Amino acid sequence: MRDQLEGRRPFQFSLRTFLIVITAIPALIWACDRSVMRIEDGDLDVEMRYQAIDLETGSPISGATVEIADGENTTKPLGPPLRTDVGGFASRICKDSMCSWHVSNLGFTNKFYAGGAVPWAARLSAAGYERTDWIWAGSKNREWNAEYLGNHKGRVTIRVPLRPSGEATSK
């Protein structure tokens, strides 16, 4: 028996085998994740979270003012203005917003759609920065991220860059 084994090479991974294995594992995980998808629609409480950031540096702006108004009539404010925290975030809950979400088997490829579901507009201002125009939740020209949090709750984060004005106070 020993004579038979002496002529054989021990098992070795070639580069080709290694590349196939490291490519196949993520593909198998993705396939398992996507194998079962639940698509749901419904009314969710959506946390609208605005982040004020400096246009030039990308740094968060604390103390910025976030005005929220009815999306169809921006002269109608929806409550008092909000102030951003040290991370540049300010948020408000929009109750019973019509949204869609796709829940995958393992949760890696979940998708949540809230665009147009929140009938709000917002504009941001801060000392030393120009005030933004009104921004609608479904605006395509803004960087935003929608998340389904489970239990009929969602979050939409909209990053809003503010342009430095060179003035000491906001307009």
Image: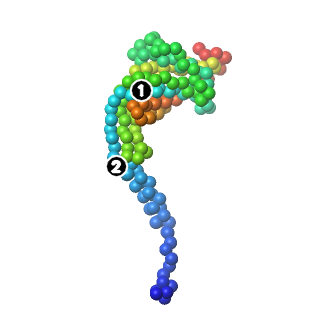
Query: Secondary structure beneath disc 2?
Result: loop
Label 2, residues with CA under 10 Å away: few <14, some 14-19, many ≥20: few
Residue in the picture at 67% in, 17% down: 168
Q: Where residue 45 appears, x then y in whole percent?
A: 41, 26
Q: Is residue 98 left or right of residue 11?
A: left
Residue in the foreground of this view, choosing between 114 and 105? 105
Quarter of the rendering containing residue 101: top left
Q: At which x and y percent is residue 171?
A: 59, 14
Residue at screen point 64% across, 15% down: 169
C-alpha separation, residue under disc 2 versus residue under disc 1: 28 Å
- Dot 1 surroundings within 10 Å: few (below 14), some, or many (20 or more)? some
Outermost top residue? 75
Which mark is first along the chain, 1 or 2?
A: 2
Q: Nearer the viewer, residue 69 or 102?
A: 102
The residue that mark 1 highlights is 45
Can you see residue 160? no
Which residue shows up at 53% across the image and 16% down it?
81
Q: Which mark is residue 35?
A: 2
- The amino acid pointed to by label 2 is Ser
Residue type beneath disc 1: Asp
